Image (cartoon, rainbow, N blue to C red):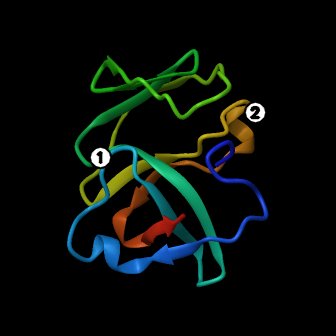
Amino acid sequence: MEPTYHNGGFNFCWKLRYLISKPGRFDVVTVRLAGDQVMLLKRVVALEGEEVEFREGVLFVNSEEVFEPYLRSSCHWNLPPRQVEKGCVYVVGDNRGMSMEQHLFGQTDIRRILGTPVW
């Protein structure tokens, strides 16, 4: 999630945040991958029912370009359009200067989202 968060940092997770609402676009969320020990910070870029794609590193949601002021470096990612399923969101990190193959991202079941980091 660099440059927003730095590797090796320590953050608290506000677990109550999504008990009363669903994650919104651009929220930074804590995603549980396996058990209670492996978690990642990711940014929600598309919501259920929306179509998401990358063209030469530019994010498009429902065929409209999305301005992402939090990114410091550009990328050249290409990802064909895909629909976000019901009960899911599409998450990706802010550090996109590396190739797509070096990142964990994509459609994520909302139940895997534990909360949002507390600054």
Residue at numbered disc 1: 47
Please state which amino acid type lies under the numbered disc 1: Leu
In the displayed structure, does residue 94 sit left or right of residue 10?
Answer: left
Who's the residue at 54% across and 64% down the image?
119
In the visual, does 103 lie left or right of 50? right
Return the x and y of residue 55 as percentages of the image width and height: 51, 17
Compared to residue 86, the image places residue 34 above or below, namely below
Outermost residue to the front: 119
Q: Residue at x 69, y 45 (%)?
A: 2
Dot placed on the residue nearer the N-terminal end, 2 or 1 = 1
What is the tally of numbered marks visible in this picture? Answer: 2
Q: At x 33% / y 79%, what residue is drawn?
A: 16
Residue 22 position within the rendered picture, expressed as x and y whole percent measured from the top left: 25, 62
Tag shown at residue 98: 2
- Location of residue 53 (image quadrant): top left
Gap in Å between the C-alphas at discs 2 and 1?
A: 24 Å
